[in-house]
Structure formats: structure tokens, C-alpha cells
Image: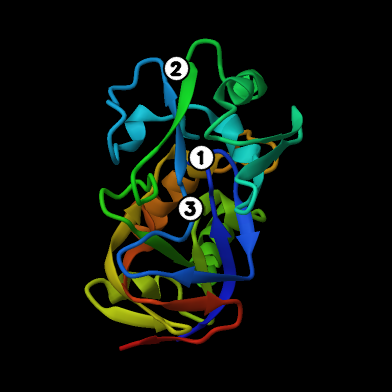
Amino acid sequence: MGTVADLWRHPIKSHGREKLAAVDLATGKCVPWDRHWAVTHDVAKYDGSGWASCQNFMIGTRTPKLAGIWAEFDDVLGQITLRHQDIGAFTFDPNEDAEAFLKWIEPLCPADRAVPTGIVSADGRGMTDSDYPSVSIMTRSSHAAVEAEIGTPLELERWRGNIWLDGTQPFEELEWIGKTIRIGSAELEIREPIKRCLHTAANPVTGERDADTLGILKSTFGHQNFGIYAVVTKDGQVALGNQTEVL
């Protein structure tokens, strides 16, 4: 059914991605430290308690240059290093240095859009777009199908997935909804497809919108979905090269 080709986490929602070699998944939890923090804005209606929808946070749909951020998280020191080609690198503790972070990120934020105001986290889970703790799974074959229709090389990072699989048929993953799959020693229940937003149009290097990903999905494939949300139902490790099977 495929093998694990890439693993990613995004410590701060919409503010950088980090490549991993292996990850330990726990039942009912997100990928550790994935979307652990999120950045609020001045028109958010978030009360500071628990999970909230993405409309309350700074995201690439409204601020496309955020797509150009890369991240490295040191879970021992609790520090993140963010990098963007336009503003350089910045290392900080999200729990302590929010003001310094807001100054660093300011040049990437359009003057006529929402202004970032702080960093928040939910108790015991990541700020995923789903209202339940999820792990996102995507396939390279589906990516290649979209890339072929666009007619130019397309970066995998646009889709912001956690687990990437190789060796499947294009959009085969949409047939796994309601099923349980084993990846490495972990098991996950596939819940629903991921409906995509304009963030995927932004180049993950430059942050510029340069690909009509949503238009291609809708006109060629008849939907706006790419990837699937899953819930971990059995603890286990997932590592590069692990086999995947539908149970």
C-alpha cells in the first residue's frame, strides 16, 4: 500500500515546517509538537481556552509570505529557530518571547490585513484545522497528479502534511475514509478528506502565490480535497521507509 517517504511537523501553525526522520504517535494525539502554538491576530475571537478554528489565527490564506518559513524546534531547550529568505533567522521560546517574535514576523504581514498580536497554545493538543486532534496523511502520487496538471514543478511543502506516502495510486487515499491503517507500529483511523485553502497556492520558498492549486483540484479532479485526516488509535512509531497497510 505504500511506504513512508517524508515526515513533517509544524511547531507554530502556519509559521514554518520541520522535516523529521521518525515520530512517536500516541492514541488520540497529534504529531508531537505539531501546531502546538498558533499566532493570534487583532480581530480574533479566541478566548484563550483550548482549541479554536483557523480564522482566529495568522495563516497563509491571508498572509501568503508565511509559506516561506522553515522551522527547527529544540524540544529540550523549548526553543524554535525560524528562517525566511527575506528576514533571516530568529531563535526564541514561544512561551516567553512573543513580543520579539511579533517584531520579527512583522515584515511578512500585509499592512492592510490582520495584525499578529500573540502566541497561544491549546491544552494537550495541536491547533490543527480539524476540531479533533488529527494527523494529516498525503501521497506523492496525488501530488504528482496535481503537478502534472499545473505543468510545472510543485513543492510538497505546499500541502503542509505530516506523513507522506510513496507507492500508492493518485488519490487512492480518499478511498480509505472510515478504515484503519497501520503505518510502522502505529494504527490510525481515517476520518475525512482535507478541504484545501488558498495557502497551497503560495510558494514555500518565496511565499508568493504562483500556482492555481485550488483551480486544478476543482476543474480536473472534481473536488477541493488533498490528503486525509486521521486519528491515532494505537500508539507506535512511524519512521521513514516504514510500510503501510489497510487493516
Q: In the displayed structure, would residue 96 be above or below residue 35?
A: above
Residue at 38% across, 75% down: 172
Q: Which residue is mark 2?
A: 114
Instruction: Name the mark on residue 230.
Output: none
Q: Which is more toward the observer, 153 or 75?
A: 75
Left/right placement of residue 28 relative to residue 7 reads left
Q: Position of residue 65 (x, y in %)?
A: 61, 31
> Which percent across, then down, holds residue 183?
44, 81
Q: Residue furthest left?
A: 178
Is residue 86 something that shows in the picture? Answer: no
Q: CA distance from mark 1 to mark 3?
A: 11 Å
Residue wearing tag 3 = 34
- In the image, what residue type sits under mark 2? Ala
Quadrant of residue 114 within the rendered picture: top left
Q: Which mark is residue 14?
A: 1
Q: Is residue 88 left or right of residue 97?
A: right
Q: In the rendered image, which quarter is residue 111 located in?
A: top right
Give the CA separation, mark 2 to mark 1: 15 Å
**Label 3 secondary element:** loop
Quick one: 180 or 211, which is closer to the camera? Answer: 180
**Circle 2: element type:** loop
Q: In the depicted view, which residue is nearer to us: 20 or 111?
A: 20
